[in-house]
Amino acid sequence: MPVTISSDAPVAEPRPLEAIQAAVTRVTRRGHKLGPDSLRISAEEALRGHTLEGAASLGRDHELGSLTPGKRADFVVLGADPLEAEGAEIAGIPVLETWVDGVVKHQVQEG
């Protein structure tokens, strides 16, 4: 069954890696447990829920949600693989670059 993950932006700051971590661990950033462990999903399901399934729920999966020729090139370069990280460590993965429409909008400066 497809899962969609989103934020309450602009009411709350969008923090995709925190949302993915909470879906995987079922624990909020303040340490509150969100229901039984049976509600946990895998990091892969959570990442898909924040990308492709999110775009599909908006009816925009033809232009967003995956890196596919003809779609917008919106993506981030992360300092670690969220699919390999411990669930409780996902939110701490550094964002090294942010790209929007194929143009770098944020880049961590070394040094």
Image: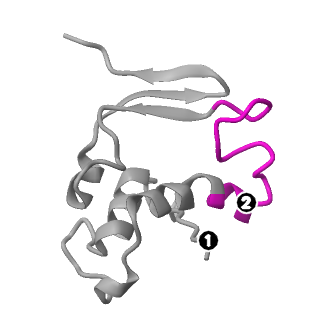
Horizontal side of residue 111 vs 63, given as left or right: left
Query: Residue 59 colored magenta?
Result: yes
* Helix, strand or loop status at disc 2: helix
Q: CA distance from mark 1 to mark 2?
A: 10 Å
Residue at image coords 67%, 27%: 101
Q: Tag 1: residue type?
A: Pro
Please determine whether, in this image, residue 46 is positioned above or below residue 109: below
Residue 99 sits inside the magenta stretch: no
- Taking depth in this image into account, of 38 and 94 the one nearest to the observer is 38
User: Tag 2: residue type?
Assistant: Ala
Indicate the position of residue 68 as horizontal and vertical percent values.
71, 35
**Residue position for label 2:** 56
Please state the extent of the stretch shown in magenta in the rendering.
Answer: 53-73
Q: Residue at x 41, y 71 (%)?
A: 41
Q: Is residue 9 left or right of residue 73?
A: left
At 46% from the left and 62% from the top, the residue drawn is 46
* Residue 28 position in % (x across, y down): 28, 71
Q: Quadrant of residue 55?
A: bottom right
Residue 87: image location, x then y, percent: 26, 60
- Verify CB contact (< 8 Å) between mark 1 and mark 2: yes
Residue ID at (80%, 31%): 70
Closer to the N terminus: mark 1 or mark 2?
1
